[in-house]
Structures are given as structure tokens and as C-alpha cells.
């Protein structure tokens, strides 16, 4: 008989609907001729509307550029690359694939080369010129100009980070000047998966009718039974009343003997002892997990574990952020825990600790998520700002103002 084969399509669960924008700190690169003489510098910045993008969806971005050189810009190239890495004790393999590319993105303004005199003046301006560039570039990439997009393929691997396999996706933006190695570029991490949906409808489980629980007679015995995972939401346990001679549950009839010692008891799974409620045990679970948000979310609902989160000091809070497996989830895990700490008395010291533990490309989003919870922002704002770069301070300036006025909404 020929074996019958069939294919089963497995799709990952939808990603969260809340966007994760990213504004790249502008890159400034010196452009030199073949003799090594500087021809000036090029600065450019990129804003990505949502770095968490679904298969088949558009990845929207903006580019702003300042060309302070005597060399013209030929092209602005954009591509999304997939990198698959497998690390074991005996091998370290990797493969790269370009998923989609735009050979030349059209950008209005800032690309034309300058006269030598203007370039020299820019050099003399030094730091002041850089600050002006930051403000100009930020203004451009937060406007409604220079909006571009590219479509993520329908068939592409999910971004994934495990102990052996790491699948990552990056968006690469490169300025082509014809000078080769001097061409500036930036790489922006992306998280690709199943498209997000506003509401995920969980499958329902139809439960059987309630099991009657009559009083026990001389020929009856009660057995405790653990429910399956599918029934976990209904009741934690149920008593099954079975006649001592025989009973039927799900399968064939099981005949019991009258010998008390020979009565087969429904096998119950041997559960490991509950973990001691400590940060170290939480960190261990997070290291072995691929979805730390679910772990933290479920433990916050547990009254015993909630006490741990309520008592977190800045170092403990920063430690949790540091152990988040998916960097893209760091800000939303931070904002999940923040309102629980000290019964809502979240401080700038906690925000500062989280900032130090956050992946570099997530720092702006982390501050935006946590500022609404800081109860001492009037006095503690400077301690957070000291941890930020000049660019991060420019991007977050309006967020600080709105947080202090109470108009910055919780993300």
C-alpha cells in the first residue's frame, strides 16, 4: 500500500499591533579623493515607521540628507537582507540573502554638491554645524516629505533568536558617491513575522456537561484527575466518581479489582516543584524562552510574583530589560512592568537603568514608553537626559515636554 502523505502549513502567531518606529542617528562620513584629501562630509538620517513588519506588508521609511562636499551623490540605495546563522560547538555557519532592494530612492533636497568655499565654511563651523544638521535632518524625517516604501516578500522566514539558530533581518541604506569605501551607510534591525492583527480570536474549547458528584456509597471510590491543557481555563481540578468494579473515561472500559492495593489510579503528571520567586529564576526562564513578553505578563497576574515586580529597584528593572530575548519587545515589556513598580511610583532612576540595558536601536522607544510613568520627572529629567546622545535628546525633546505637561500618552 502506497503511503499517504499530506502537507500541513504552519504559520506563526500574529505579531503585536503596536508599531515600533526607529529614527536612526544621522551618520556623518568624510569623503576623500584618491590622494586622501577631504572633499567634505555627508550626513544623512533615516526614520522607519515600524521596524516590526509582516510578510507581504509595506515597509515605510523617510530619508533626509545633507551633502557638504564638492562631490555629487549618485544614488541612495535601500535593501532588506536576511542573515541566517547556526552556531554549534563544532561549527559556525551563516548565509545572507537580499530579500528586496530599491536601486535609487528619490529624495528631494540636500543631494547637490557644494562649492569649495561653502565646504570650507562648513568645516569651520564644526560642532555648531553638526547640531544644526541634527535639527535640520530631524525636521525633514518627521515631515510628510521624502516618504518611500518597499514591500516585504510574502514568503520569508520569521525573525528568530534561539540558542543555536539566529535569523535576523536588516534594512541597509547606502549613499553612493562613486568614491567606494567612503560611501556612508546605516543598518536598521527589523523584526519580520506574521502580519499583526488588532484582535486575535483565540480558539474556543467546548467543554462536556458538568460531571455529577453524588454522595459516595460503599461500592464507590473517588479519584482526583488533572484536566488537560485545553480545559485549563475552566476548572483547576475535578473529582471523578467511579464504581469500584469498572469505569469508562475517554477510551475502553477499565476493569478494577476489589483489592485496595490493586486499584489502578489515574496517572497524574509529576509536576516539578514551583520555582522560588526570585529574579534569578525569572532570568533563567527568560533565557530559555523565545517570548519573554508572555512570561512577564503571566507572572504579573500571579499575586506572588507580582510582589516581586512591585518591589523592583532600578538594578532589578534594568536586569529584566537586559534579559529580554527579542530586542524589539524591550520597550513594551518595560511599559508592562513600570506601572506595577512601587504601586505606580515609577522613578527616573528606573528609566535610567532601563536605558542602560536597552539595545542601542531601541533606546529612543524605551524612553518614549517609560516617560509617562515617571512620577519625579520634574526633578529627574536631567538624570535621563545625561544618558542620552545629542541626537536622542533632539528626537525626545518634545516627548519630555509632553510628559511633564501630562499629554504624552502611554504606549
Image: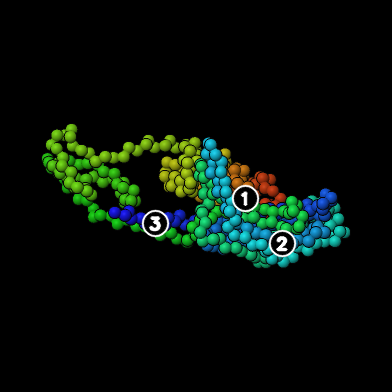
Question: How far from the left and from the top, in percent, is residue 195?
Answer: 50, 60
User: Is 356 located above or below residue 15 in the figure?
Assistant: above
Local crowd size for mark 2, using a 10 Å CA cut-off: few (<14), some (14–19), many (≥20): some
Residue depicted at 55% across the width and 39% down the height: 91
Find the distance from the CA under tag 2 to the CA under tag 1. Answer: 25 Å
- Mark 2 residue element: strand
**Circle 3 sits on which residue?**
7
Question: How far from the left and from the top, in percent, is residue 15?
Answer: 49, 56
**Circle 2 sits on which residue?**
75
Question: How far from the left and from the top, in percent, is residue 366?
Answer: 59, 50
Task: Please report whichever mark, 2 or 1, sits nearer to the chain's N-terminal start.
Answer: 2
Local crowd size for mark 3, using a 10 Å CA cut-off: few (<14), some (14–19), many (≥20): few
Find the distance from the CA under tag 3 to the CA under tag 2. Answer: 45 Å
- Mark 1 residue element: helix
**Circle 1 sits on which residue?**
361
Find the distance from the CA under tag 1 to the CA under tag 3. Answer: 39 Å
Are circles 1 and 3 on residues that touch, CB within 8 Å? Answer: no
Any part of residue 85 in sight: yes
Residue depicted at 63% across the width and 58% down the height: 79
Quadrant (top left, top right, bottom left, bottom right) of the C terminus: bottom right
Q: Decide if residue 21 is on the left or right side of residue 130.
A: left
Question: Extreme top residue here?
Answer: 261
Task: Please report whichever mark, 3 or 2, sits nearer to the chain's N-terminal start.
Answer: 3
Residue depicted at 66% across the width and 57% down the height: 173
User: Is 291 located above or below residue 51 in the figure?
Assistant: above
Along the line of sight, the residue nearer the viewer: 122 or 396: 122
Task: Please report whichever mark, 1 or 3, sits nearer to the chain's N-terminal start.
Answer: 3
Q: Decide if residue 184 is on the left or right side of residue 116.
A: left
User: Is 71 located above or below residue 347 in the figure?
Assistant: below
Question: Extreme right residue here?
Answer: 117
Amino acid at each position: 500500500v502506497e503511503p499517504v502523505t499530506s502537507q500541513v502549513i504552519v504559520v506563526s502567531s500574529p505579531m503585536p499591533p503596536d508599531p515600533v518606529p526607529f529614527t536612526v542617528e544621522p551618520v556623518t562620513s568624510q569623503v576623500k579623493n584618491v590622494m586622501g584629501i577631504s572633499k567634505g562630509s555627508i550626513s544623512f538620517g533615516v526614520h522607519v515607521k515600524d521596524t516590526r513588519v509582516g510578510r507581504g506588508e509595506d515597509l515605510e521609511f523617510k530619508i533626509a540628507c545633507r551633502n557638504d562636499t564638492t562631490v555629487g551623490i549618485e544614488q541612495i540605495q535601500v535593501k532588506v537582507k536576511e542573515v541566517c546563522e547556526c552556531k554549534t560547538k563544532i561549527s559556525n555557519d551563516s548565509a545572507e540573502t537580499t530579500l528586496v532592494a530599491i536601486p535609487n530612492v528619490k529624495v528631494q533636497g540636500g543631494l547637490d554638491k557644494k562649492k569649495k568655499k561653502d565646504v570650507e565654511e562648513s568645516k569651520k563651523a564644526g560642532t555648531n554645524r553638526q547640531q544644526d544638521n541634527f535639527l535640520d535632518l530631524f525636521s525633514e524625517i518627521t515631515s510628510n516629505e521624502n516618504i518611500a516604501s518597499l514591500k516585504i516578500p510574502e514568503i520569508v522566514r520569521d525573525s528568530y533568536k534561539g540558542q543555536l539558530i539566529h535569523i535576523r533581518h536588516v534594512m541597509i541604506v547606502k549613499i553612493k558617491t562613486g568614491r567606494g569605501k567612503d560611501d556612508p551607510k546605516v543598518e536598521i534591525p527589523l523584526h519580520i513575522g506574521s502580519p499583526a492583527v488588532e484582535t486575535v480570536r483565540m480558539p474556543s474549547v467546548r467543554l462536556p456537561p458538568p460531571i455529577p458528584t453524588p454522595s459516595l456509597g460503599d461500592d464507590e471510590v473517588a479519584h482526583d484527575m488533572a484536566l488537560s491543557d485545553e480545559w485549563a481555563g475552566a476548572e483547576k481540578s475535578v473529582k471523578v466518581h467511579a464504581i469500584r468494579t469498572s469505569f469508562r473515561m475517554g477510551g475502553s472500559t477499565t476493569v478494577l479489582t476489589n483489592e485496595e492495593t490493586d486499584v489502578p489510579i489515574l496517572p497524574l503528571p509529576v509536576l516539578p516543584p514551583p520555582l522560588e520567586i526570585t529574579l534569578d529564576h525569572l532570568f533563567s526562564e527568560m533565557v530559555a524562552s523565545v517570548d519573554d513578553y508572555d512570561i512577564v505578563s503571566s507572572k504579573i497576574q500571579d499575586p506572588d510574583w507580582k510582589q516581586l515586580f512591585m518591589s523592583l529597584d532600578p538594578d532589578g528593572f534594568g536586569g529584566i530589560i537586559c534579559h529580554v530575548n527579542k530586542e524589539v519587545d524591550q520597550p513594551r515589556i518595560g511599559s508592562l512592568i513600570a506601572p506595577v513598580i512601587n504601586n505606580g511610583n515609577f522613578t527616573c532612576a528606573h528609566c535610567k537603568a532601563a536605558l542602560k540595558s536597552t539595545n542601542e536601536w531601541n533606546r529612543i522607544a524605551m524612553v518614549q514608553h517609560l516617560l509617562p510613568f515617571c512620577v519625579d520627572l520634574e526633578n529627574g529629567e536631567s538624570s535621563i537626559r545625561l544618558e542620552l546622545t545629542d541626537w536622542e535628546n533632539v528626537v525626545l525633546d518634545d516627548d519630555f515636554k509632553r510628559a511633564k505637561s501630562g499629554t504624552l500618552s502611554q504606549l
